[in-house]
Amino acid sequence: MEVLLAQPRGFCAGVDRAIEIVERALTQFGAPIYVRHEIVHNQYVVEDLRRKGAIFVDDLHDVPTGNTVVFSAHGVSQAVRQEADALGLRVFDATCPLVTKVHVEVGKLRAAGCEIIMVGHEGHPEVEGTMGQSQGGMYLVETVADVAHLQVNNPDKLAYVTQTTLSVDDAAEVTRALKQRFPNIIEPKRNDICYATQNRQDAVKFMVPQCDLIIVIGSPTSSNSNRLREVGTRMGVESHMIENANELDPNWLTGKQRVGITAGASAPELLVQQLIDRLKTLGVKSVRKLEGVEEHVQFPLPVGLGGNVDRGSSIRTTTKP
C-alpha cells in the first residue's frame, strides 16, 4: 500500500500569521493573552496555544479591562471592534489579509450605494464578520435555490462578495445563478476565494484519480477542510475527514492500494506526519509527495509585535517525508 501526499496541503499564510501573532503577544506581554473565538479552526492548534497561556473567549466582556485580545483569522464585525475600544482593550488583529480585502470591498461598495449579496455559509465566523461590516444592505445566500428566492431593493445597484473558504465549484455555480438573475451585478475585482483554498482543492482534484481512498486532516468546524473531503467524494472516491491519526478507521484500508492524504489550511503538518506513522503500522510501504504548487506567500505582522518567538517546539512543523 502506498501513500500519496497532496501538494500543497496544511497551513496557509493567513493561518501561519494568526498563530504567530498569538505566540508573539505571549512572548512580549506574557500570559494570559485573550483570543476572541478560536484563532483558527483546528483543535490541536487551539490546545497548543492554550497550554502556552492563551485564553479563548466568545464574549469580549470576559476579557479584563486593559488586557490584550487577539481577533481570530476569520475577522470580526465593526460592532466587535467598537466594543473592544469601549472596553479599553489592547487589540492585535489576526484577520487574514485576504478576508480584510473582502471587508474593504464591502465598505467601498456600501459607500457607493450598492446592496451586497454574500455567498457563504450561515453561522460561519468569517461570514458573520463580513456581514457585520455594514449596518444593513447585505444579503446572505448559500445555494442556487437561495438566489432564486432572494428579494433586493434595486437589482441595478447590486454587487456580490464570497466567503474565502468556499468550494470553488459550488461558489461558481451560485455566482453563475446570481449573474443570470441579476445581469448588472458587480463582480469582485479579484476572486474572493483565497489562493490557498483554490490550491488545496486543485491538489485534491489532481490526486483523486490516482487513489482509491482520500483522507483529509482537519477539524469539523473548518470550512476549507470540509470542502476538501467533498471534492474527493464528488469525484467518486471514498473520502474521510479526521482530526488526528487516532480517528483513522483501519477498516477504511481494506482492499485499498493507494491512499491520498491532504490537510486543511488550518491543520499543522505534524498531524500529517503522525497519520503517516500510523499508516505505516497498518501496511503502508511507501510515501510519495505529488507535484503541485509551491506556496511562498507571507503576510506582515501587525505593528507592535516585534521580537523573536522560540520555534523549538513550534506547531508549524514543515518536515516532509
Image (spheres, rainbow, N blue to C red):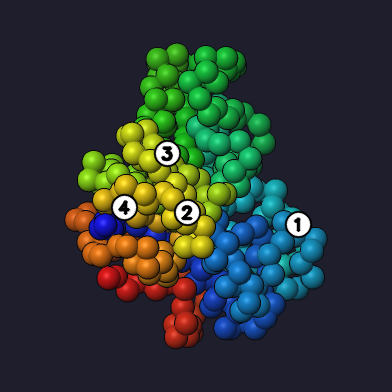
Between circles 2 and 4, the one closer to the viewer is 2
Dot 2: element? loop
Look at 47% across and 56% down and name the residue there: 248
Q: Residues within 10 Å of mark 3 (few under 14, many from 20)?
A: some
Local packing at callout 2 (Cα closer than 10 Å; few below 14, some 14-19, many 20+) is: few
User: Residue drawn at (33%, 34%), measured in percent from left and top?
Assistant: 236
Residue 249's disc number: 2
Q: Mark 1 belongs to which amino acid?
A: Asp
Real-space Cα distance between discs 4 and 3? 16 Å
On screen, residue 151 versus residue 284, left or right, reads right
Determine whether 96 is above or below 49 in the image.
Answer: above
Asked whether the viewer can see residue 273, the reply is no
* Disc assigned to residue 230: 3
Q: Which mark is residue 259?
A: 4
In terms of sequence position, does the residue under pointer 1 or pointer 3 come before the other?
1
- Which residue in the protein does label 1 denote? 59
Three-letter code for the amino acid on which mark 2 is drawn: Asp
Q: Position of residue 305 (x, y in %)?
A: 52, 76
